[in-house]
Amino acid sequence: MHNDQLLPISPGFRPLRISVLVLLGLLVAASSAVAATGATSKIAPWVQQQLAVNSSSEAILRLREQADLSGINRAAPRLQRLRDSNALLQATAAASQADVLQFLHDKRIEHRSFWINNSIWVRADAATIQALSQRDDIAYIHANPSVRGDFPQQAERQSPLTQGGTGIEASIALVGAPAVWSQGHTGTGIVIGGQDTGYEWNHPALINSYRGWNGMAADHNYHWHDAIHSGTGVCGADATEPCDDHDHGTHTMGTMVGDDGGSNQIGMAPGATWIGCRNMDQGDGTPATYTECFQWFMAPTDLNNANPDAAMAPHVINNSWGCPPAEGCTDPSIMQTVVENVRAAGIVVVVSAGNSGSSCGSVEDPAAIYDASFTVANTTINDSIAGSSSRGPVTVDGSNRMKPDISAPGTSIRSSIRNGGYAVFSGTSMAGPHVAGHLALLMSANPALIGQVDELENVTRSSALQLTSSQDCGGTAGIVPNNVFGAGRIQTDVALNELRQEVIIIDGFEDQVSLRDD
């Protein structure tokens, strides 16, 4: 998770701090137990280190066979596209995981299967990891570290809790959302998914847009999932209703949809509905919990994790978190297949760029680094880049990919927090929700764009306020797009105006975009 939450959290996983000689000795000892056959090349170093000092380790088994979604018809209706994608992913996982799952069952190894990227989470001892690494059907054994948020120091914290609203927040007005509302487009018919520390669903600014609330009673089936199965905070584990043990998630959702019907107009798309998945326990997540939430969004289930229904999937997912190498996510590809498959199914994946700036090459964490992610930088109300906002290019995977893709306000953003309150936070986690809400407004006004990820991202880029930087990251100083702002800061009203005359091309067929008059 990115370093923009302002409240302290309980300690999570810390990287082992032991001397080089001791570490070498431990790894030599572990190698005889874990991979005497030389299969260590398939085992992440973090897993090897854990097994050197512990009797067991968490890990993620990535199966060699992967589904190919390139043949999915992107011009098909959204629901058909989702169902076809899910069916192919599930069939691939069912066929290729059968033998491994039987092995784990026979050995009574704790495990959890994922079809979204054909992987299996396990908690196993050294002998079992060794046996698994020797299997031809397993491509790699990834780390599954607990990723702890990297939060600002006391001197960097923003203002304390504030209760009194003054109407439309300045950042919402800056990007032109009210001008879109005035045309009758507030996000109606669009579902935003958020995966974060959780959500206070009955907050006055969030309750009326929660899909599980009908105005009189709540039903959390298909609208909420908890990927934390051994939590220790106030939410516990496997919470059966939306819960936030950290404020961060509630704050991000407020920026997407928040409106209390009075003076707290904090959200970009107040007419949209939201659903949520908790992927962090008091600010600590793992690749497995992130993966579980993404999979649930592809086909939400009831509270018993049964009866999945792709018709309940969101149109856009906000991801205000990151998985840094410093906490064990040393393999930059750990989430790549997951994000690519979600995008291929027609769901936009909005990801905060991170708060490791101001140096170039600081967009370095999954999932912000991926081409399939729509990565967001943090700007001030004056359209300057925030000093902490991560810059591109992406070097951690050797791609030199330009990132971020786009920018949005993320500095001194007032939004909802737990216990019905409001507070001002800063970071790319605050910028990303502006973009998710922006996309909800565009899809609500332009139903032809639902599921068309490329077109949504393209119009967001082409309509952005172009911003240049003198900082020469990857040779992009003074030009647009660049590795500081991406294509520039979102302008929702300008994007909507562009779409009035735009003709989009889908698989060779022209489709005139029609605006909905709500």
Image (cartoon, helix red, strand yellow):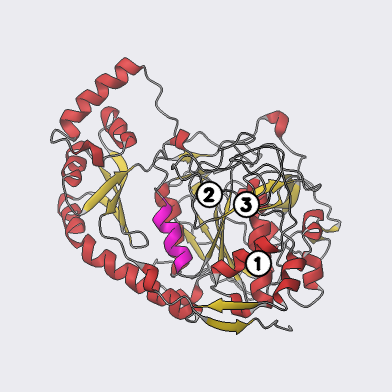
Q: Can you identify the residue that label 2 sits on?
A: 368
Classify mark 2: helix, strand or loop: loop
Residue 127, given in percent of the width and then of the height, sits at: 17, 38
Q: Is residue 316 above or below residue 53?
A: below
Classify mark 1: helix, strand or loop: helix
In the rendered structure, find residue 376 and report the number of the disc placed on it.
3
Quote the CA–CA distance across marks 3 and 2: 8 Å
**In the figure, is residue 498 to the left or right of 359?**
right
Q: Residues within 10 Å of mark 2 (few under 14, many from 20)?
A: many
Q: Residues within 10 Å of mark 3 (few under 14, many from 20)?
A: many
Rendered residue at 60%/64% (across/down): 457
In the rendered structure, find residue 459 and report the number of the disc placed on it.
1
Residue 307, given in percent of the width and then of the height, sits at: 39, 74
Q: Is residue 283 above or below residue 337?
A: above
Residue 139, given in percent of the width and then of the height, sits at: 25, 50
Q: Residues within 10 Å of mark 1 (few under 14, many from 20)?
A: many
Q: Which label's residue is closer to the chain start, 3 or 2?
A: 2
Proximity of marks 1 and 3: CB atoms separated by less than 8 Å: no
Quote the CA–CA distance across marks 1 and 2: 20 Å
Nearest the viewer among 396 and 302 is 396
Three-letter residue code for mark 2: Ala
Q: Is residue 137 above or below residue 395?
A: below
Quote the CA–CA distance across marks 1 and 3: 15 Å
Nearest the viewer among 419 and 14 is 14
Residue 215 magenta-highlighted: no
Q: Residue furthest left?
A: 37
Q: What range of the chain is rendered magenta?
A: 335-344
User: On the rendered image, what quadrant is the N terminus found in?
Assistant: top right
Proximity of marks 3 and 2: CB atoms separated by less than 8 Å: no
User: On the rendered image, what quadrant is the C terminus found in?
Assistant: bottom right
